[in-house]
Amino acid sequence: IAKEVAKLLEMKAQLGEDEGKHKFVLKTPKGTRDYGPKQMAIRERVFNAIVSCFKRHGAEVIDTPVFELKETLTGKYGEDSKLIYDLKDQGGELLSLRYDLTVPFARYLAMNKVTSMKRYHVAKVYRRDNPAMTRGRYREFYQCDFDIAGQFDPMIPDAECLKIVHEILSDLQLGDFVIKVNDRRILDGMFAVCGVPDSKFRTICSSVDKLDKVPWEEVRSEMVGEKGLSPEAADRIGEYVQLHGGLELIERLLQDPKLSQNKLAKEGLGDMKLLFEYLTLFGITGKISFDLSLARGLDYYTGVIFEAVLLHQENEHVEEPVSVGSVAGGGRYDGLVGMFDPKGRKVPCVGVSIGIERIFSILEQRVEASEEKIRTTETQVLVASAQKKLLEERLKLISELWDGGIKAEMLYKKNPKLLNQLQYCEDTGIPLVAIVGEQELKDGVVKLRIVATREEVNVRRESLVEEIRIRTSQC
Amino acid sequence: IAKEVAKLLEMKAQLGEDEGKHKFVLKTPKGTRDYGPKQMAIRERVFNAIVSCFKRHGAEVIDTPVFELKETLTGKYGEDSKLIYDLKDQGGELLSLRYDLTVPFARYLAMNKVTSMKRYHVAKVYRRDNPAMTRGRYREFYQCDFDIAGQFDPMIPDAECLKIVHEILSDLQLGDFVIKVNDRRILDGMFAVCGVPDSKFRTICSSVDKLDKVPWEEVRSEMVGEKGLSPEAADRIGEYVQLHGGLELIERLLQDPKLSQNKLAKEGLGDMKLLFEYLTLFGITGKISFDLSLARGLDYYTGVIFEAVLLHQENEHVEEPVSVGSVAGGGRYDGLVGMFDPKGRKVPCVGVSIGIERIFSILEQRVEASEEKIRTTETQVLVASAQKKLLEERLKLISELWDGGIKAEMLYKKNPKLLNQLQYCEDTGIPLVAIVGEQELKDGVVKLRIVATREEVNVRRESLVEEIRIRTSQC
């Protein structure tokens, strides 16, 4: 036993030594992740659906740097500003990683004096938030933004943004969803008629924003207890924020003796009515809910706001369904560009941001639960050989195929076994094998094997590119 | 005059006031840029050519976070480490922006215990270098990397990397180019036989690396003066580094009485010969130059290294051609993954990185010089109306088109003038206009106008999607 213990201690010491040698931690930073090939394949599908939709609506695309001057981001995000990543001061400008794509877009418009633009932007943004990665909440995550900037007739671009959310969520087949809609002017008007002092609008708005997570009683006690609102005002708010519905609710509130007296609320409700008329023409009101509890966190919204939530997880195969909340959000921000323009010139904007990570979490789990085999390459043919000493011939053939535009691979071995080459095709889903052998070389042909059926045909070398093209165009 | 001066002073004061109000600078950070829609269109073309090539060679794709733990990057880049962007210590882990895609790839392989992989990665990297933006040198720039990791027979993956560079540069039609090739083992062997002490290999290698920018005399005086090399050793190096050629040069050096005695050099030359044999089979030796002056800056290379340079600017339209240097580079790095593996297990790798910004600079200038009109959207049809009060009808029609998968736009005005709608098509290159009018609505048709020919045809509403699809599939 003593001997054994000594041996184990020695082994342990050795391990400790190894660890000492490489004392760094082998991981990605907190709240971030790598995307492997399978995950990238799923991600590409989601991106394609989203970008196709943006293009269908005639959007141009731009890109901006991953960091901005720190001052560009200052004063745009309210309480959330503490979540901004700053770069170290290494001399020169003070920089921060972008927090969203909206502020860089506004900076872009002001800097280039653009007064009208419909653009999309798909890129990563950064927030030093508490990550909840299983629920698709990361510190580095993609946003897919579509925005319409310019002075236009009311609610036409706003309605298009909602149509876009509807198209994308339908297309991705994520299950049932609802798009909640409200208007900052209605909220502000509501606060005013409920007796909230002007100075408390923003902080009470933040409390309302929590209603999708906590019950009204808790929000009420925060308003009264922490934020010093009178219980009467809170109760009046309580009555409003529990309302949600469609055109009939808008009509009712337009008749509301208090709200209808408030200029802001009246404007907001009038526009909301117009919005619902346009959404009716688009045939999508079934999924839209005018919801007075929707507040949205960001400071810069000035009009319509909206947020899409998935209603339940349709994925029956998954035992522990991921709980996902909002998958898209946006609204109107008419003042943001003016904050950047030296003369304060305003460019009205409305836009939507699709939160891809949550959508991606759902689809990833769905694929994992199903038996679906995802190919991670597009390779059409493996160039193989049945005998030894044919590396040169494989190199010559694969070069011809590449030059002919065929997606081709070969094993990087001098003399690979045919079985290993065929196994590689099975593993990676390559549908065809082009086999060179002594006899084929003499005859000027290549043996083409169809992996699925094990059928083999001799193809004349000069027709090989065309033959592969035809045989792989069906799928 | 006094009046005029007073006026000017007043104007100046006003300007100063405005500046005071918005005292921030409206710009992107030093060394970075926005990509507008036209630039994005060119960028997409380049990406497509590159990614198509990577896929043609059967590569999978991965993505990694934009920042890594600081220690992940430590000790990988030699003297260039000072160019790494660090993030501010805001509590938690110390982070740095990635400097290239190679080190994150090696970290990915080690972390996931992957021992064999062919992958590409297209992403931005960050270097606090002195930007020279007109020459396509930025602090934030894209790299398009293709790497083959795994234990394979010698020089087969290496040859494929060079084939890839050849395919991409040919495909992009950037004019004549040459791919310089060398091997770190040949360099080290050469230093040894020239009498460079082991401890000076790296720093003398850095001097050699400058030979593409400064003449030999200057490099020699740096070696002797600053780096304390003996004049005799420098002169011996001078003879070698001026050599470049093909297979015959390799053969000659294999017979070189000094070099052939050095184990490293012999190994390197043997592999170089094998590489040239494979490149001959690929038919690309015409653009390959075995060049003893090629050294490459990065620390982690262990074998073959290469760099592609454009020979001259083929663009005759441009008055001041951009001077571009290296547009692609890479090499073998067999030790990098082992630096991350807790047990030091090695995974041999070879890869290439395409420098898109320089290529992009050339193509951007070429497009600007030519009269080529680049479309920045893919919109197939504008939904328009000839009369007033048809907003609702336009919304209904465009909704039908979107749902039918047609890329459609409309002006966000209640009553746009027909002329403005047609002008919008001219400006943005939209080929078709679907015009709704009272009469058409009654007849159940839509008037389809072909912008180029001004031809107009009535199309039954239920066939409109199909008709648009047919008419826009030709282009």
Image (cartoon, coloured by chain):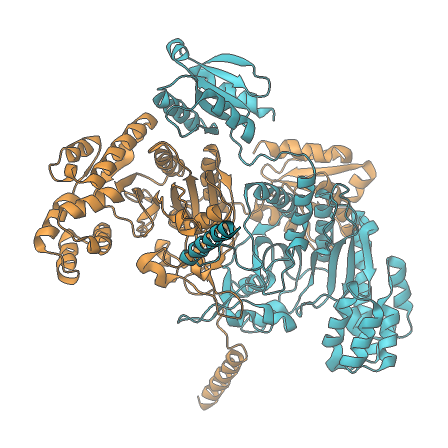
Chain colours: A orange, B cyan
| Residue B214 figure quarter | bottom right
Give the percent coordinates (x, y) of residue B437: 41, 14
Depth check, front residue: B307 or B20? B20
Question: Quick one: quadrant of the C terminus of chain B?
Answer: top right
The vertical placement of B224 against A475, above or below, is below
Give me the residue at 63% from left, 64% from top: B130
Give the percent coordinates (x, y) of residue A408: 67, 44
Q: Is residue A80 left or right of residue B77?
A: left
Give the percent coordinates (x, y) of residue B356: 64, 51
Give the percent coordinates (x, y) of residue B285: 82, 51
Q: Is residue B135 left or right of residue B378?
A: right
Q: Extreme bottom residue here?
A: A2
Q: Extreme left residue here?
A: A232
Depth check, front residue: A397 or B283? B283
Is residue B380 shown to the viewer in this render?
Answer: no
Is residue B216 shown to the viewer in this render?
Answer: yes
| Residue B127 figure quarter | bottom right
Q: Is residue B319 left or right of residue A243?
A: right
Depth check, front residue: A291 or A263? A263
Give me the residue at 45% from left, 18% from top: B435
| Residue B77 figure quarter | bottom right
The tally of labels here is: 0
